Image: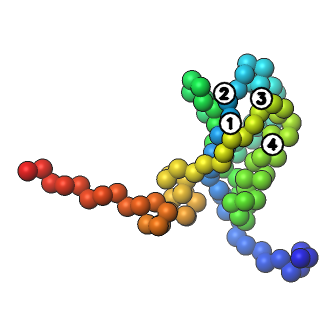
Amino acid sequence: MTDSQRVTGTVRNWYFSLVLDAPLTEDQSNTLDHLDRFNDGRIGLAVRPGYSRFLCSFEAETLTEAVAEALGFFEEFPGVLIRSVEMDHFDLRDNGMATPAVVPTPPPVKAAP
């Protein structure tokens, strides 16, 4: 498919998380501090004991393109492996993807007796 045949979609912000297979090591954290591409506001580290993930917000026509761009950041970040790409119910809503088929409606609240 040539560029002229490609239909141009709407560029929008996509929200998702890149979950690491293990928490960052001290060396990896030091490396991250010196990688400029991680300091432009589109990707940020969230850490808890035993857990590391990057919260992402990328502009692209599709979610696939946004994830691919985010994964490209890790080419200069050796030893860091992404285990999964995740979206919680807030991301689904923000991405315009929350529907009753994707995110079930919560059960009705029962009145107290």
- Alpha carbon separation for disc pair 2 and 4: 17 Å
Looking at the image, which residue is at 80% across and 40% down? 74
Looking at the image, which residue is at 68% across and 41% down? 83
Is 107 positioned to the left or the right of 45 in the image? Answer: left
Could you say which is closer to the camera, residue 110 or residue 8?
A: 110
- Alpha carbon separation for disc pair 4 and 1: 13 Å
Is 38 positioned to the left or the right of 108 in the image? Answer: right
Tag 1 or tag 4, which sits nearer the N-term?
Answer: 1
Asked if the residue at tag 1 contacts the one at tag 4, i.e. Cβ–Cβ closer than 8 Å, the answer is: no
- Alpha carbon separation for disc pair 2 and 1: 7 Å
Q: Amino acid at mark 3?
A: Leu
Residue 103 in the image: state x and y as whole percent: 46, 60
Is 94 positioned to the left or the right of 113 in the image? Answer: right
**Residue tagged 3:** 32
Residue 52 in the image: state x and y as whole percent: 63, 32
- Alpha carbon separation for disc pair 3 and 4: 11 Å
Residue 41 in the image: state x and y as whole percent: 70, 42
Mark closer to the observer (2, 3): 2
Tag 4 or tag 3, which sits nearer the N-term?
Answer: 3
Looking at the image, which residue is at 66% across and 57% down? 13
Mark closer to the observer (4, 1): 1
Asked if the residue at tag 4 contacts the one at tag 3, i.e. Cβ–Cβ closer than 8 Å, the answer is: no
Numbered tag placed on residue 73 in the rendering: 4
Tag 1 or tag 3, which sits nearer the N-term?
Answer: 1
Asked if the residue at tag 1 contacts the one at tag 2, i.e. Cβ–Cβ closer than 8 Å, the answer is: yes
Asked if the residue at tag 3 contacts the one at tag 2, i.e. Cβ–Cβ closer than 8 Å, the answer is: no
Q: Is residue 35 visible?
A: no
**Residue tagged 1:** 20
Looking at the image, which residue is at 60% across and 30% down? 51
**Residue tagged 2:** 23
